[in-house]
Image (spheres, helix red, strand yellow):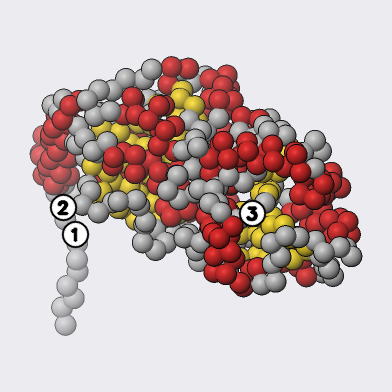
Amino acid sequence: MAIIEYIGYPKDHWKFNRYVWSLIIFWLLLPVIIKFISYLSYLKYKRNKSKNKSEKELNGVTLIVLGDLNHSPRMKYHTESFLSLGYEVNICGYLNGELKLKNDKNREIEIFPIEIISNEFKLPYLLFIIFKIFKQTYQLIKMTNFAIDENTKFVFIQNPPSLPILAIVLMNKLMYHPQIKICVDWHNLNWSILNLKYKNESHFVVKLMKKYESWFAKLVDVNITVTRQLGNYLVESFKVDPSTIIPFYDRPKNELFSPLNDQNELKEIISENLNLFNGYDQVNDRILVSSTSFTPDEDFKVLINSLKELDGKISGSKNKIWMIVTGKGPLQNEFKKMVEDYNWTNVEIKNVWLPIEQYPKVLKIADLGISLHYSSSGLDLPMKIVDLFGSGVPALTLNFSVISELVKNNQNGLIMNDNDDFKEMADKIYNVLFHDKELYLKIKQGALAESAKGWDEEWDSKLKPLFKLSEWCVT
């Protein structure tokens, strides 16, 4: 039987000259070349379409927060303020339930939900962060291609967190939409929050985040800061142009937070919340409230120990303290265990997650609010005190560098001298609630005066001149 032997191609079969090879390679790459040329044409089309629009024709704003929109009051308030100016608003963020905005019916608003990326595979923290950045980057690039268009005038980004969204938006501006002005609303410093985990500013991850914030802060058009000192930090440490800095304090929405009207309203709120205040005595009892996310930047040991001290001070009297702690978070179980491990007599501690419509009501009936926020950077202010002031409630707060921009000691609240001294905290609470009525009336009047300073007034005076549709300039 004959055997067929494969001898292959002749040795010189593929010996084409370079022109033939060039033609073959060109033919193979032709789909890629066509795709690339089409993309360049599309890119040019989008850029020209955006550039050809005048400032007066632009009436869109895109707000982006890498957080839960319903628990981002400042960004929600910005959204409502932009809507009131006639902007078409796109808002992007995590959406846990329906986004509730004031009078948003029949208004130009579109919501772009961001997918929450969880650590399903139980990856080590650093590995998960890398995975999250890559996956979220892809997701956010797709989202911004729709949320930012040729009609967009401003892109408003909350920081923290700004990784990777700030880089993505700057790339979008460079490639597609040169007309947009990028505004960063600085609530704090991302690197300082990250440092709560590493507790080492020299750690390469913390240093990398600091470099990221520093570099991109210089490239944006407007830097809005929650305190003056935060703005000073951006100028001095990040070398940001001072003309781009606008300090803008948090203020409460007057239709959400308002002082208690009278004793009838107090009785009504108590009756609505008997699960919290069953047995409350209006004459002898006092209500304390503290709002929290149970995160490492709040030390509840100081509060618990001060309440133990207070329990001893009022033991045997008719007085009782109702301590309402609202919120939930990673250290919540640790807090509950500290409460359960002590035999309380005249102090009642309740930890609850209040519906958004009940939260302002419970705040306004409090005699004193307590803030345990000490700020990872020392440059931001706690929103919870803003809510308290909006409700006409004075606050006791820990001491840190910028707190005096909000709380004036013995005028609208009390500031600790030693943040770790639980006896000092107990003495201040006891003195102002049960002993020094004159001081309490003074700080109560100060808090009521603060309640008159609403969000709309602050926004209209500081930001409205900047964001009016007819013009744009940084002043």
Q: Quadrant of residue 417?
A: top right
Would you call the spot at circle 2 few (<14 residues within 10 Å), some (14-19), or many (20 or more)? few
Front-lying residue, 149 or 437 = 437
Distance between the alpha carbons at the discs numbered 3 and 2: 94 Å
Which percent across, then down, holds residue 25? 16, 42
Mark closer to the chain start, 3 or 1: 1
Q: Is residue 36 left or right of residue 109?
A: left
What amino acid is found at the position of numbered circle 2 in the picture? Pro
Q: What label does residue 366 carry, if any? A: 3
Mark 2 highlights which residue? 10
Which percent across, then down, holds residue 206? 61, 38
Query: Which mark's residue is nearer the viewer, 3 or 1?
Result: 3
Q: What label does residue 8 carry, if any? A: 1
Front-lying residue, 161 or 229 = 229
Would you call the spot at circle 3 few (<14 residues within 10 Å), some (14-19), or many (20 or more)? many
Which percent across, then down, holds residue 291? 61, 53
The residue under the point 34% across, 25% down is: 466
Q: Can residue 253 be seen by looking at this rendering? A: yes
Which percent across, then down, holds residue 465? 33, 24
Element assignment for label 3: loop
Contact between marks 3 and 2 (CB within 8 A): the answer is no
